[in-house]
Structures are given as structure tokens and as C-alpha cells.
Amino acid sequence: MICADDLSTGRRNNIADFSDHPNFTFLQSDVSTSLRLTGPLDVVAHLASPASPPDYHRLPLETLAVGSRGTENALKLAEQKSARFVLASTSEVYGDPTVHPQTESYWGNVSSTGPRSVYDEAKRFAEAISMAYSRSRGVDVGIVRIFNTFGPRMRAEDGRVVSSFIAQALNGDPLTIYGDGEQTRSFCYVDDLVRGIVAMIDSEEAGPINLGNPVERTVQDLAELVLEITGSESAIEFHPRPVDDPGRRRPDISLAATRLGWQPQVSTEEGLLHTISYFRSVAAEVSAAAGSIAGAQFEGTHRADAPAYTPVMASPA
Ligand SMILES: NC(=O)c1ccc[n+]([C@@H]2O[C@H](COP(=O)([O-])OP(=O)(O)OC[C@H]3O[C@@H](n4cnc5c(N)ncnc54)[C@H](O)[C@@H]3O)[C@@H](O)[C@H]2O)c1
């Protein structure tokens, strides 16, 4: 296995456990610039992209580049090696959805110019060019649309809601909710997602196929669950909701079930237990992230009509 990563949002120590394995090679390289590898390849799995909102707001041009040029470089590599190509797309292609739960046949409700567009439109382009390589060049393409996934080894300052809440709870800082907390998400544990991606690699399906956990909960419920599991007495703090923040998110996973024989097996509660235990094991990183999570998460992306920043405190109970 060859892993190509520019480490722009990833970390070398995430692959420390197998970096000495004789069948594993790491290449530090920007896939938007070039992707040339010698030797045969069976599969090109294209997962490279900034993925958390603070990352893609900080790296807007790089996010567009990796979704466009990076995807084309990966497709060309798959074509050259006669390899299967699997694209990690996203539920963000549905934008702020008007159809619920989201089925693959829904075309989405996406702003092409808003602050999230660099990510959403890059992934939509990535899907389009993948299908074009499939139709016009015969590349064996499979597209998965990943819904909110979490687990150990996320960065404490990553800015996604699960890692932010856990780090804030462990630090005794207020949990920051953007909006009234009634927006929903469906959280998939990383082990389930990896099984789903492997099933897509092993199949002949083109997709797109949703991969996510269909158990939907509000962001406020998630905050309360994190407080309960960590035993933290942190408060919950409400901040203005960002522009284009999706109101509801839940995958319809019928296609994944029938075509891939896949469904998630790990509950959000169990996944949180593993993730919280991991975050406790990197206490220095978690406390170093204190102060950089709140406010930075959606900097510059609030609604134009949002009131000035005035946190409202609420009891977690
Ligand atoms: N985690 C989720 O909830 C979720 C949801 C939908 C889609 N996805 C997609 O799954 C993939 C993995 O996401 P993740 O959550 O593990 O994010 P992540 O940031 O942890 O991992 C992405 C990796 O891509 C690397 N990368 C970024 N730009 C690159 C470039 N130009 N060249 C080489 N490497 C580059 C980063 O260094 C990082 O290691 C991404 O494509 C993301 O868009 C994730």
C-alpha cells in the first residue's frame, strides 16, 4: 500500500503503527501537483482533501485544487494502471437539503458562492469528473458520499463538532453550539466507515452511495451526550449560526445495504466512548487546543444578519 499525503491537515503519527510494515510506503506529496507512481496498482482511493470547516476556510484554493486537479491526477493514475478508482465524496454535495433523509437521487441545495462552496463545489466537481472518466475513458469508478464521521486520532483543534465538544468538555470549557442546537446530524463511527469504503473498493458499484449512520440527533443532544459520558460540568454556549449551515442531515442508506451489504454496527454512544478515551490519552494536545476551538470554528462565515458575537450561556441539564 502506498499512502500519498501532503500532511496539510493530517499527521504523520496517525500512521505510526504501520509505517514500518514491509507492504506500506508513505509519500509526502501534494496530489494536486502530481501523482506519479511506479509499479502496478489495483486501487486508487482518493481521500485527500481538507475536510473540517476551519481547514477548508483556511485553505480555500487548496481545497478547490485537490477536488479538481487532485481528483483528475488520481483518475489519470487509475486509468494508467487500469486500477479501480474510489472517490471520498461527501454529504455536503446535498448542501442545506430540502429532501430528508437524503437519498442519492437528490441533486442538492448548494450555494456556489458561499463560504462553504470551496468544499461543496470541489466535491461536486470531483464527482462530475469521476463520472466523465468513467463514461469517456472507461475508468472503473466508485463514489461514496460520506456523512459526518468521527473517531480516535481526530485533532483536538480540528473544528468538527464531535472533536470540539469532547475537547471542550475535557478542558472544562463551555461547549460551543452555533445556532440554537436544533440542527441535526447523523454521526458515523470511523470503523464502520472504513468497512463501507472497503466494501465499495471490493464491489463493482459506480455509486454514488451514501455511507453514514442514519441515527439522527440534534447538535444540542450531542453536546448533552458528551457531557454525560465525560462527566464534565461544562456549560453549553450558543453562538450565531454560520452561513449555509445545513439544517438537517440524515443519510438514506438503502443503497449501501442492498448493493454493498453494509450498515453501521457501532452506536454513537459506543463510538463516543472510544473517542473520548482516545482524547483522554492525548491530554496535553487537548489542553493545548483550549481557546483555539471556540470562535475559530466558523470565523468569517456567520450570516450577514447575525447579531454581534454575544455568547448566551445555558446549563447543560
Ligand atoms: N470525516 C468526515 O466526516 C467526512 C465526511 C465527508 C467526506 N469526508 C472526506 O473523507 C476524506 C478524509 O477526510 P478526513 O475526515 O479523514 O479528513 P482529514 O483532514 O483527517 O484527512 C484528509 C487528509 O488529506 C490530506 N490532504 C489534503 N489535501 C491534500 C493534497 N492536496 N495532497 C495530499 N494530501 C492531502 C490531509 O493532509 C489529510 O491527511 C476527505 O476527502 C473528506 O472530504 C470526510
Image (cartoon, rainbow, N blue to C red):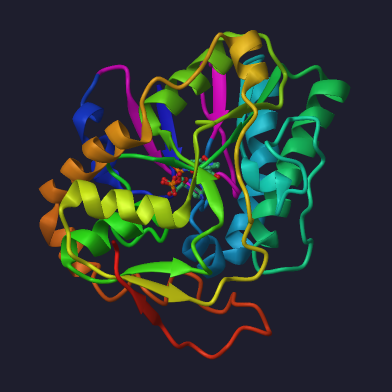
| Front-lying residue, 1 or 268 | 268
- Outermost bottom residue: 308
Q: Main secondary structure of the magenta part?
A: loop
Residue lying at 60% horizontally and 45% vertically, measured from the top left? 249
- Outermost front residue: 317
Q: Position of residue 284 (x, y in %)?
A: 12, 60
Where's the N terminus, which quadrant?
top left
| Front-lying residue, 314 or 73 | 314
Question: Residue 139 sits in which quadrant?
Answer: top right
Where's the C terminus, which quadrant?
bottom left
Residue lying at 64% horizontally and 9% vertically, measured from the top left? 258
Would you place residue 144 above or below residue 155 in this image?
A: above
The answer to whether residue 40 of the structure is visible from this angle is no
Residue 45 inside the magenta-drawn segment = yes
Question: Residue 245 sits in which quadrant?
Answer: bottom right
Would you place residue 106 above or below residue 276 in this image?
A: above
Q: Position of residue 123 (x, y in %)?
A: 68, 45
Magenta region, residue range:
22-46
| Front-lying residue, 252 or 225 | 225
